[in-house]
Structure formats: structure tokens, C-alpha cells
Image: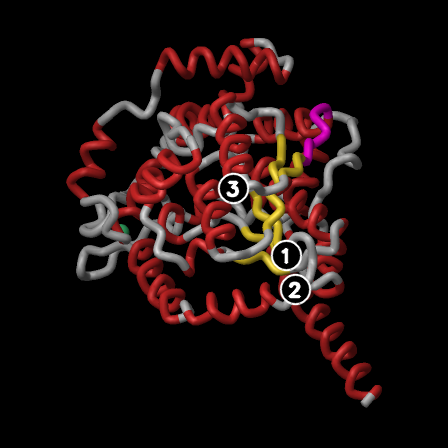
Amino acid sequence: MECKRCVLDTTVSDIQFYEDGFCNYCTDYLTKRSIILKESNELKILLRTFKLINQKYNCIVGVSGGLDSSFLLYKTVELGLKPLAVHIDTGWNTEISFNNILAITTKLNVDLKIFTLDWDQFKELQIAYLKSGVIDIEFPTDHYYLSALYKVASDLNIKHIITGNNYVSEGIMPNCWIHNKGDAMNMLDIYKVFGSNTSLHKLPTLTLIKKFYYYNIKKIENIFLLNYLSYHRDEAKKILTKECNWKEYPIKHGESIFTRFYQRYILPKRFNIDIRKAHLSSLICNNQITKKEALKILETDIIDETLLKNDKDFILKKLELSQEDFDKMMASPINSHFNFKSEIKIKKIYNTLTKAFLFRHFLKISNRH
Ligand SMILES: [Zn+2]
């Protein structure tokens, strides 16, 4: 069964359909989006805040070379902000992505900082995820992307991080296809069970203590600026290509060899998931593509055998895995993230502690006056 509005169907294990034939994912999404649109006044307030900051950089913009983050950097400059572009190098950049980052920062005259993750430790973590059988093998990439941005912001005393996450191109994502990217406890437990003895101390893990420090003491905010702007992907592509010599990838998330291999090979082959259904559903709900066009795209094969053969050879070599190791990992039992420790389970306690801290902090301030 397929949703009447978007292209999600019963391959999403926790999908629900309402009487009108619409699914819970696009229905919830449209409700949330209407709330965000009402909050568009926030942009004016944010811009006023930025103008008061008298620093060389008043925000950090995470750049991957992809469309969302490249357009985001373009817009921050256009809005008169003073960004420092930060790229997190996980070791899987494609040549085109790095060229895009250089082209756009040069053209916009924005300083670029590259934060390189410790490859030996990151590699061990990725192998542990491949062995574990959990679905969100991209967790380490997404987690360290954000945690490294927080670290850079904290080190440079910058209070605002701007990331390319947005409702237009990635607002719909089934819960059963991913895991909460902030859940460092889950990641560390998966590593404890399936990882090697290598410590992960060189990676900037966003533990509960660090979260508390960044959010409540350093007061660093993560802003999803694209949600407040008129963001049309085709128009963004035109602007960036014309003005910044930016080049489009053949596929979404083509900036990382590992990500595209995960999305185009591991997810469909191992978990029977076509992630394009989520991306295309977001675009349908934003009138950037019709359902008919989306279905036509879904008829094309998700796996490009030649590209993926090259990617697979490259990945196995880089991770120092044999074909046999990899086949074993792909055949290991599927595992739930919730079979491991999780911060989500103790989130309530954390929220209570945070509130208690803020309350005490408030009392201290009140006592001074
Ligand atoms: Zn739907």
C-alpha cells in the first residue's frame, strides 16, 4: 500500500495510514512545516542578534560541498552575516565535493577551516557499525559532523552554528530508518560490543556532559537557517552554478563515497529500503516535484553497478577489509539500536537536571540584583 500524497509505502515498517489515504509521515510533516512558516519572523530577530555581535566571525557554517550547505553559505553572505566556513573531513570526500567547497569559499571570500577526524579511530568505529547489524551505519558521520562543529564553535567562542538541515529536502524521514544522531551513548555501546580495543579519545564525541557544556554554559545555538528562507533546490542550483562555479553531483549526497554506498547499496540490499522515497516525499510536499515525476525516478534502478563496484573496491581497501569480511558483515543478523544503551531512555532525567541547573542559575542571577 502506498500513501495517496507522497511515495512512502509499506516498506516503511512503522507507517500508518489515515482514513483519507494519507500517511502519518507526510501528514505530520505538513503540520510541522506550517508551524515553521509561521515562525518566519524569527529570521528578522536572528539577523538583529547577529548584527550586535562584534566578532571577526559571528557564525559557523558547516559545508560539505553539497547543494544545501553551499546554498546556505551563499545566503549567509548575502544576508550580511560574517561566517567562518567549517568542513569536517571524515576521509570520504569526493573530488567534486572538495572542489565545490574551495570554489564557493573563494568566490564568496569566506575563510575556510578544515577539521579532520582522526582516521584510525573513525575507521574502527565505522567497521563496528558495519558488523553490528544496526540500520543507521551513517550515525558516526552525522554525529561527528555536528559534534566537531560544536567543538570549533566552542574553541573560537562563536555562539551560532548554522547547518544545512532543512525541511524542504529532508523533512520526511521514517523513524525506523535512522537513529537519533545525538545519542552518543548508543554509539559508544555499539562500539563496546562490536569495536576493536582502539580508544575513541581523539574523536570529539558529543557526550551528555559536553552537550550540557555547549548548550547551557557556552550557550551555542544550532540554527537551521534554510527553514526560514525561500529555498527552491532548482533555483539554488542555478545560482550556485552561475555565480560560484559550483558543480552538481550525479546523485544526492554524492559528496561522500561512503554515504552514497550506504544509501545506494547497503540500505536497499540489506534492509530493503529505497531512501529516495523519503527525499522525494519531502520534495512532493513542497511542490518541488510532482508525485508522477517522483514515481518515474523510483522506477530507475537505485544501484548503478559500475559506480558501486568502484565505490565498494575503494571502501574495502580504505577500511582494510577483505571481500570475505564484508560479506560476513552484510550477512550478520539485523540488530535494533534499542538493543544497546541509549540516551533516549534517560532523556527525561537529563531534561530534569538541565531545568534544575537553569533554575539554580536563574536564582543566582536574581540574588545578585
Ligand atoms: Zn504520505
What's the amino acid at mark 1?
Asn
Mark toward the start of the polypeptide (2 vs 1): 2
- In the image, is 87 to the left or to the right of 5? right
Mark toward the start of the polypeptide (1 vs 3): 1
Q: Which residues are magenta?
A: 115-120
Residue displayed at 54% across by 40% down: 63
Q: Hey, which residue is sitting farthest right in the picture?
A: 368
- In the image, is 319 to the left or to the right of 29? right
Please rate how many residues cluster around mark 2, counting C-alpha atoms within 10 Å: few if below 14, some from 14 to 19, many from 20.
some
What's the amino acid at mark 3?
Leu
Q: Please tell me which residue lies in front, 272 or 261.
A: 261
The residue pinned by badge 1 equals 58
Residue 246 percent location from the top left of the image: 42, 32
Mark toward the start of the polypeptide (2 vs 3): 2
Q: Which one is in front in this view, the residue at disc 1 or the one at disc 3?
A: 3
- In the image, is 159 to the left or to the right of 363? left
The residue pinned by badge 3 equals 108
Please rate how many residues cluster around mark 3, counting C-alpha atoms within 10 Å: few if below 14, some from 14 to 19, many from 20.
some
Residue displayed at 62% across by 57% down: 160
In this picture, is 278 found above or below 97?
below
Q: Please tell me which residue lies in front, 363 or 272.
A: 363
Q: Quadrant of the C terminus?
A: bottom right
Q: Quadrant of residue 87?
A: top right
What's the amino acid at mark 2?
Ile
- In the image, is 93 to the left or to the right of 349? left
Asked if the residue under mark 1 is in contact with the one under mark 2, i.e. CB atoms within 8 Å, the reply is yes
Q: Which mark is residue 53?
A: 2
- Residue 118 falls inside the magenta stretch: yes
Q: Quadrant of the N terminus?
A: top left
